[in-house]
Amino acid sequence: MRVLYINNGGGGWADYIQVPEGQTVERFFAERMPAGKPEDYLIRVNRQPVSRDTVLQENDRVTITPVKVEGAA
Amino acid sequence: MNDKQMARMAHQIQQALLQLRKNRYLEFVRQVNLLAGKFQELLRESRKLGISLSRDWLAATEHCCKGIYRQLSDVMFPVGHLQGLLDRRSKETPQVAAVFAEIKALEAEFGEVEFNDEDNCLSVITEPITLEDVYLGPFRIALCLDHLGELHRQTAYFVTALEPHPAATDEAVTHPHISNEAVREGDGGPAIRAALEAGRLCDFFTLIRSILQTYNPDSPYVSLADWYGVPCYDCGYVMDSDSSYYCSFCENSFCEECTVICASCTETVCKSCAGTCEICEQSICPTCTRVRCSQCESICCQSCLEDGLCPDCKEERDNHEEEPEEKEDKKPESSRPAEATAGGRVVGREPGAADSGVALQSDGLGQTPVLPGPVG
């Protein structure tokens, strides 16, 4: 099935990607951000915070935003 | 903000994003025309090159080649700029319903969303922020809708400290990564712009909040270690640690105005600890004030000291060494009694008495010559 994935940790571009049926948010995060810790990110599905065992649905909009972003001077 | 206000707001934002998209295309057209102009110049130069070559004007050909080389480098910048514009172009503008949903999500995330009619800004307020035990207070992140359409040229948001705790050395710096209400986005820059252009308001505001909640010690306006500044021990002026000077004698920090550099060893020392060379009156550190003239014991810097003597004593010693030699040159061949020095002067025979062979006593001891023969 297809979901819209927005990774705000990189360039912040949105992409439609294919994920297996019944995939949970936790599994999705582990696959997309293998080096990341869930507590360092704000994970939302369809603009709402969700629990880790939430199962993704067709055309869901998954947003992963880092809670720590280094600014500059 | 009620739903009606939110809907009106969503419509305004969507219009601003449409304007941004249009402005980007306009900028693209402008840049393409600029590039086309450059190519026209290149073409003209190419024709000249062909004519010069056909007539065997090799010097003119070379001149044309140099011109083309110069123009090629002028073409590079517009090409790169154009590519950047194309890369960043927004392919579609969000619908009003999507923007409305974003404002709703924003409200859920931050608790409250405000709209200021006067400056046409949508804003949220963060929780009070503390970084490495430095309390910075809450911040208002405001997205200015009037500037959203000009996002390709200028920033469209500003961040204001609501309880300012600015750096001691710069009141404009209310956060290590904010100066004059402008955020230096650092790593977050591309994602912030992408979120804004796509109308993903919730992502935009949360990314700004993420920057505010993070301290990058490698690149702050003012480091948190220097947030409260370093006061000068003498005059009280507050400065950052890089601008302060440490006096190793009294072990305090001072500003530039309250320190001097030792003329002998170049160590920085505070004015209270510093001494002065009695000859040139330059400042010297306490260690170097121990160096004195071996004769008169006046404090001397290294540059004034020669052979362990101050310039006065050195001159005096040199005079002593030279004068006997001069006198020696004037002496007749016959041997004379030993001369003595007293009070820095050479004493000996009176010039007139030299030939008479009459010995004189030194100054102050009676100098009347006693001649042989009857008196009176």
Image: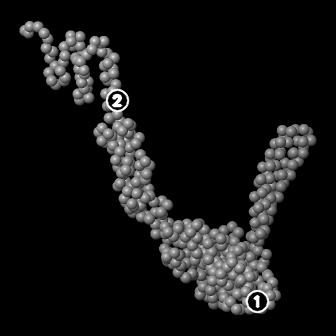
Residue B32 rendering spot, x and y as whole percentages: 80, 62
B4 shown above or below B200: below
Q: Quadrant of the C terminus of chain B?
A: top left
User: Where is mark 2, residue-wise?
Assistant: B318
Residue B170 rendering spot, x and y as whole percentages: 50, 66
Is there any visible trace of residue B245 in the rendered image?
A: yes
Residue B106 rendering spot, x and y as whole percentages: 64, 85
Q: Around disc 2, counting alpha carbons within 10 Å, would you say few (fewer than 14), some (14 to 19), or many (20 or more)? A: few
Q: Amino acid at mark 2?
A: Asp
Q: Which mark is residue A23?
A: 1
Q: Amino acid at mark 1?
A: Gln
Q: Quadrant of the N terminus of chain B?
A: bottom right
Viewer-proximal residue among B128 and B376: B376
Q: Residue at x 43, y 51 (%)?
A: B267
Q: Residue at x 60, y 68 (%)?
A: A72
SS at mark 1 in the image:
loop
Residue B234 rendering spot, x and y as whole percentages: 37, 60
Q: Residue at x 75, y 70 (%)?
A: B88
Q: Are marks 1 and 2 on the same chain?
A: no
Q: Around disc 1, counting alpha carbons within 10 Å, would you say few (fewer than 14), some (14 to 19), or many (20 or more)? A: some
Q: Is residue B128 left or right of residue B335?
A: right
The image's colouring method is one colour
Is there any visible trace of residue B167 in the rendered image?
A: no
Viewer-proximal residue among B239 and B77: B239
SS at mark 2 in the image:
helix
Q: Residue at x 66, y 73 (%)?
A: B188
The image quadrant that residue B354 belongs to is top left
Q: Chain of mark 1?
A: A
